[in-house]
């Protein structure tokens, strides 16, 4: 097995890697081969980064990241982007480490996706200036030709404009720290389990409905389950028991996650009606309250601002954009409804009392619009509170 170095490597480096390959090959362990090469190459790049002459100037690297491979497009300073190339992950890590060591500066980017931020952290550790950008439509002309090569080339063109100073070219994603990402996984996984529980419960309810019997989607809780065991046919109960065991197992895992989530905010005061779990979801999705410089940016991140379509004399207000964090948006709507009952002195509750109070006679459509406006202002108030711009007393909150 030979390794093709896309930049001319030193003879010592080649000989050392060949020896590692031969040693690992005796054990028939390709993964061991990869680990040995990776550790040596990255170490070599770090050691020679200052002393070795730079072969390249400013390099721009656009990447389309997949589970097992990376498609990348390289552009040297003052030149056209090169043809995109595809490489397996382990080869790419070796190649990009050598490239960074031989370049004065490397600007790189890739679209956020299921592979997360591991590549970003590796590139940053090696010395590249990497950004993770929000996914967007790259076929601007609508040619309906969309593949990895065309996407990577378009990313390279936009990265060139971004580095030149056109910062509006990309919507850059905030990369959380490892600790922030691990905290966020707790609340997101709980939501996934909750959706799974709902799905399994719906399957059980649908099974019973095929026999002309309508039951609640909460048929699995202890009280209703006991009743159904006495009233439903025995053969139907046998099938429901399969769903019931799955739901009970999911419920137990959710309870364990709930106990861990509650520890995240146990030492800080909370507004009455805003539970520990909901507050944890909001804080974990916001990642860092201080990253926003104005209340307009806070409202936009929640996706709760209204859209606008205007041209010349024409102007129309549209529905909310829903362009922000959907998990945050859901948690804010839930929190807003609870605060209308638990915070009678809150200025938002007083403002929307004529629409959102239980005694108000308002159309459902009007109430939905009002609660969205309430949730948007609530997010701004939470931001002001968390950043020390306002006190709970001025907002009219009752704290727990």
Image (spheres, rainbow, N blue to C red):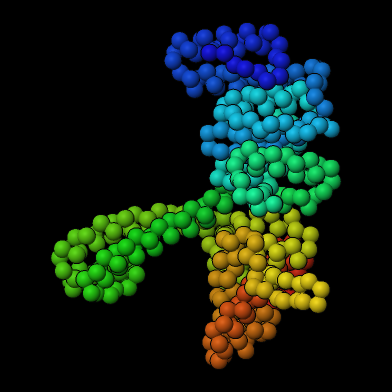
Mark count: 0
Q: Position of residue 67 (x, y in %)?
A: 53, 37
Q: Reply above or below: 372 against 77.
A: below
Q: Farthest residue toward the left?
A: 234
Query: In this orientation, which residue lies closer to the viewer: 105 or 141?
Result: 141
The answer to whether residue 130 is seen in the rendering is no
Q: Residue at x 32, y 63 (%)?
A: 203
Q: Position of residue 54 (x, y in %)?
A: 81, 21
Q: Position of residue 108 (x, y in %)?
A: 72, 37
Q: Residue at x 40, y 57 (%)?
A: 196
Query: In this orientation, which residue lies closer to the viewer: 371 or 305?
Result: 305
Viewport quadrant of the C terminus: bottom right
Choose top left, top right, bottom left or bottom right for residue 212.
bottom left
Q: Residue at x 62, y 59 (%)?
A: 325
Q: Reply above or below: 47 against 266.
A: above
Q: Residue at x 53, y 50 (%)?
A: 185
| Image side of residue 261 versus residue 194, left or right | right
Q: Position of residue 381 (x, y in %)?
A: 70, 70
Q: Reply above or below: 30 against 319.
A: above
Q: Farthest residue toward the front?
A: 143
| Image side of residue 371 versus residue 78, left or right | left
The answer to whether residue 47 is seen in the rendering is yes
């Amino acid at each position: 097995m030979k390794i093709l170095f896309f930049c001319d490597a030193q003879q010592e480096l080649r000989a050392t890697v060949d020896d590692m390959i031969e040693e690992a090959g005796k054990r028939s362990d390709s993964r061991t081969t990869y680990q040995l090469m990776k550790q040596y190459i990255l170490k070599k790049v770090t050691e020679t980064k200052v002393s070795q002459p730079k072969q390249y100037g400013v390099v721009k690297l656009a990447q389309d990241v997949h589970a097992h491979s990376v498609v990348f497009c390289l552009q040297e300073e003052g030149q056209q982007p090169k043809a995109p190339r595809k490489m397996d992950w382990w080869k790419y890590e070796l190649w990009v480490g050598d490239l960074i060591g031989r370049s004065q500066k490397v600007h790189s980017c890739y679209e956020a996706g299921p592979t997360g931020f591991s590549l970003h952290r590796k590139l940053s550790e090696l010395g590249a200036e990497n950004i993770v950008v929000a996914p967007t439509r790259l076929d601007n002309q609508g040619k309906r030709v969309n593949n990895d090569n065309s996407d990577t080339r378009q990313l390279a063109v936009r990265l060139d404009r971004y580095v030149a100073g056109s910062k509006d070219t990309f919507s850059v994603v905030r990369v959380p720290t490892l600790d922030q990402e691990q905290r966020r996984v707790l609340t997101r996984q709980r939501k996934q389990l909750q959706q799974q529980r709902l799905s399994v419960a719906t399957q059980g309810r649908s099974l019973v409905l095929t026999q002309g019997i309508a039951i609640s989607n909460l048929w699995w809780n202890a009280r209703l389950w006991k009743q159904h065991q006495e009233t439903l046919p025995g053969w139907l109960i046998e099938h429901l028991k399969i769903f019931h065991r799955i739901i009970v197992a999911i419920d137990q895992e959710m309870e364990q996650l709930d106990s861990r989530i509650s520890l995240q905010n146990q030492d800080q005061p909370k507004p009455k009606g805003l539970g520990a779990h909901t507050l944890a979801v909001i804080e974990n999705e916001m990642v860092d309250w201080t990253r926003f410089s104005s209340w307009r940016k806070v409202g936009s991140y929640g996706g709760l601002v209204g859209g606008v379509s205007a041209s010349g004399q024409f102007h129309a207000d549209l529905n909310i954009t829903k362009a922000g964090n959907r998990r945050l948006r859901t948690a804010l709507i839930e929190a807003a409804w609870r605060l209308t009952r638990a915070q009678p002195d809150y200025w938002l509750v007083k403002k929307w009392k004529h629409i959102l109070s239980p005694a108000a006679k308002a159309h459902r459509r009007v109430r939905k619009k009002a609660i969205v406006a309430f949730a948007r202002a609530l997010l701004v108030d939470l931001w002001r509170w968390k950043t020390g711009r306002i006190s709970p007393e001025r907002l009219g909150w009752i704290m727990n």
